[in-house]
Image (cartoon, rainbow, N blue to C red):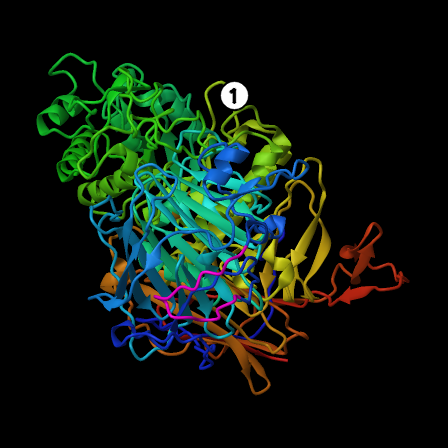
Amino acid sequence: MGLLSNFTVALLLLAFALSTCLYINNLSNHETRLVRSVCAKQNRTKPHESLVNTNPTKTQNNSVDTSGVHPESSQKTDISRDIKCTMAPESRFDCARDRLLSQGECEQRGCCYVPLPKSAGLPWCFYPSLYPGYKMGPFSPTTRGRAANLTRATPSYLPRDISTLHLEIIEETAGCLHLTLKDSSSQRYEVKLPAGVPQNKADPTQDVLYTTEYQSDPFGFIVRRKSNGRVIMNTTVAPLLFADQYLQLSTSLASSLVSGLGEHYTSLLLDLNWTSVTLWNRDMAPHADANLYGSHPFYIVQEEDGLAHGVFLLNSNAIEVMLQPTPALTLVAIGGILDLYVFLGPDPESVIRQYLQVIGYPMMPPYWSLGFHLCRWGYTTTNTTRHVAQRMHNSKFPMDVQWNDLDYAAKRRVFTFDPWRFGDLPEMVEEFHERGMKYILILDPGISSTSPPGTYPPFDDGLKRDVFIKNATGHILIGEVWPGSTAFPDFTNPETRHWWEDCITDFHSKVPVDGLWIDMNEPASFVQGSVEGCPDSDLENPPYTPTGVVGGQLNSGTLCMSAQQKLSTHYNLHNMYGLTEAYATHSALRKVRGKRPFVLSRSSYPGIGRFSGVWTGDVRSDWEQLRYSIPAVLQFSLFGVPLVGADICGFGGNTTEELCVRWMQLGAFYPFMRNHNDKPNAPQEPYVFGQKAQAAMRSVLNLRYSLLPFLYTLFHHVHATADTVARPLFVEFPTDPNSQTIDRQFLWGSSLLISPVLEQGAVELAAYLPPGTWYIQSIFPFYSKGQYLLLPAPLDTINVHVREGHIIPQQVGPALTTIASRRNPFFLTVALSAGGWARGDLFWDDGDSLDTFEMGNYCYVIFIAGQVGKRQVIFALGKLTRLNGALDGLVLGGLQVFGVPSPPLYVLANGDKVRDFTYRSDTKVSSVVCRPQKDNDDILQISVFVPKNQTVLSAGLCVCPLPQVLTVTSLALPMTKVFTVQWAL
């Protein structure tokens, strides 16, 4: 097991509370020269705005032709069709996205038709340069920013074209530009995220990070990064289209390094080679080229020199995004408005923070939810469920939460439990509680509609309170899910949320669950639309359906689009169903339990991280799905959903022992860790495998439990300051070119690099180490220039690398639940930098109470290691001004420090000599040699030699320093007081 076992350094433990963290963007004073427009006084632009009216046929990343003319006097040049249609193939924008066109039909639209038979994906029918569109009028001030009207003289080729639009530009903050495009004459559906999100206001003293330019005819806009003039968005590359059920906006991209636009079964970087992704929530097991459970219309682009930006389209209708190698993309939404946010970063971490300032910071999970969870569809009785939990306990596997799938429910109806198979469910839950465990069960949204009147209160009461979604005729829409015919709650209705809370309150009074698992909430239905079908209308059969929609129709596997909800039609609200249910469930649990809620949702939409965790659905038990679970988890980190994981060992199909071991090793570093299995499959609980496999699984589970204080602190930073837990390498190392594309490894925060085995039969691993010093194989320091190392990775090992300059708080000792692990002594793993410094922190509260950070009911400790004169010291300085008693009785039991250059003469703890310390430098290892691998000069192979006085002769060798680890044990320093540990060399 490769991580934190031996340590070296002088530790100064700095313990004090922080009440506020300030993040300040360094803004450049350089202003890009802009083309100024000669216009009337009321049209005056701001210093970072410009009006232009020319459109390049090919846009470069940093160069856009902006030779300016008066915005209201567009000079139309007489250019032949041949010239207008002459452009690089990769710069074509599809003019036949809505339907297949013949050459005559294409040219009738005023578009170019140039076949390229041997070029897959390239459009044959494409827009010429300066394709006619909307014309922008003068700007006028609004209460939020500036606005202008857009008009088109002739309709587009789309049905029910909207001829006049209202454009509003809002400078939300220095790094966030907000643009909206709406119908000027008619109210259309607009997304309002539940519970509201506190909005940051622009600081008038802070210079914005962007400049904007506007082409008046045909309308388009350009957003540049102010510091270097780079084009972030250029929508003049193709026409803006805005019809009742078809909204289209194209833009160039600053680079081909694009991530986001989930939920999809893809690598972290999207393929821009004439591909498309569809955002339409669907009950669909993860596989390529399919719309899956969630929709997140947000993307992040890595630029040059570590810069990044993001774009968010706040629209809940079905969306298709076309990606092309220009690089460019086209957004098509089939309803709503264009509500666009542009985040200027300037680095990836800042982009994510700016995005979360719009959709809301994630919730703080209960501490116990970070432990191990076990579930299966097929634990058919309480006795079976008890037996599973007992075997886990007897086999010494840490586990915090036992789950039940729908087996518990009488006739598969939620808010009931089967009187024969689960008759003693309340007693079983209390038994779990007595053992320090928690219990969670599944809660589908579909409410059975077939029970005799008066026998099923959730439906009876729901009828009285008018909480169910209705069909186009005003009657309750009936679909079909696990219990048979079902009605679906409308969570956009406040009365429905009250009814849902009452149902949860009543059930909780009988079965005191600790959290709820909301599944099937896309929403899923086993019939198309409803049991009575759906009307033939433009909502059910819109003029355009995104090509990636599984089943070819929006109502496939879900409800009728014409179904009526409180806020709007299901056509507009479908993608938000899981979000609105998560909000209602989170609110209900908060009131019912009076503690921090735990909710796990399958369906997702921006903002769900405020209320719920997410898992990646019905993954298969195979090596490909293991590998793709990493980018899936990392995507949700970008989307503001830090509590995320995949079903360990796979949900569908039979696992193997090797696959399950490797998945447990990877899953131990998912932020949310659950093993879940389907009914017909072979068992995959850890205790069913051989002893060696069990030992490997037990070892990595113990490692996770020891790291929970560190993991919990990462979640605090996500909740308080919008950091990330599972972090892509490009977010932490934005200036490292090699980190831009890696999605087979990931970080926990900025301190730990996880390098799992993802191939069958592998016993070694090519792990990339970003620039800097990393401690590999737990203890060996390696200075990387940004290199791959071939590391040993036997079945009992997952490689975890500690980054120099960081201190990892742990709790080490036997524990089968978090209640037990939280009582263990703390242990610090310290990885010294070359200069002998390191830093870490610890957030600590009772792990379950509401709003501890907001109420100041917590402890926050900072640990600092450094040098004072000739002594290496770990300081604890200052005072715990936020001390609330959560650390009472807890002690620092020991520490290990990597990078201590020589054996200490002595060790002091709070000034007293310490007897129990050891120093390791070369007890078992004579040298660690890195050499180029035979088949690949870019990969260095690690060889560890035991002492035999052997000499390695090879060109290009790099010798790693020997392990230099100071380990101090048998300490008992109270965590509630300032302390120091120091040593002299």
Q: Quadrant of the C terminus?
A: bottom right
* Neighbours of disc 1 within 10 Å: few (<14), some (14-19), many (20+): some
Q: Identify which amino acid the numbered label 1 is placed on.
A: Asn
Residue 531 percent across, percent down from the top left: 28, 15
398, 24: nearer the viewer: 24
In the rendering, at what x and y percent does residue 408 appear?
31, 22
Foreground residue among 898 and 531: 531
Residue at 37% x, 24% y is 557
Q: Is residue 36 magenta?
A: no
Q: Image point 28% across, 52% down: which residue?
A: 165
Q: Is residue 370 visible?
A: yes
Helix, strand or loop at mark 1 = loop
- Residue 814: % across, % down: 48, 47
Q: Quick check: is 77 in the magenta stretch?
A: yes
Q: Is residue 648 above or below residue 357?
A: above
Q: Nearer the viewer, residue 146 or 578?
A: 146
User: Mainly helix, strand or loop, the magenta region?
Assistant: loop
* Tag 1 residue: 681
Q: What residue range appears in magenta?
A: 64-79
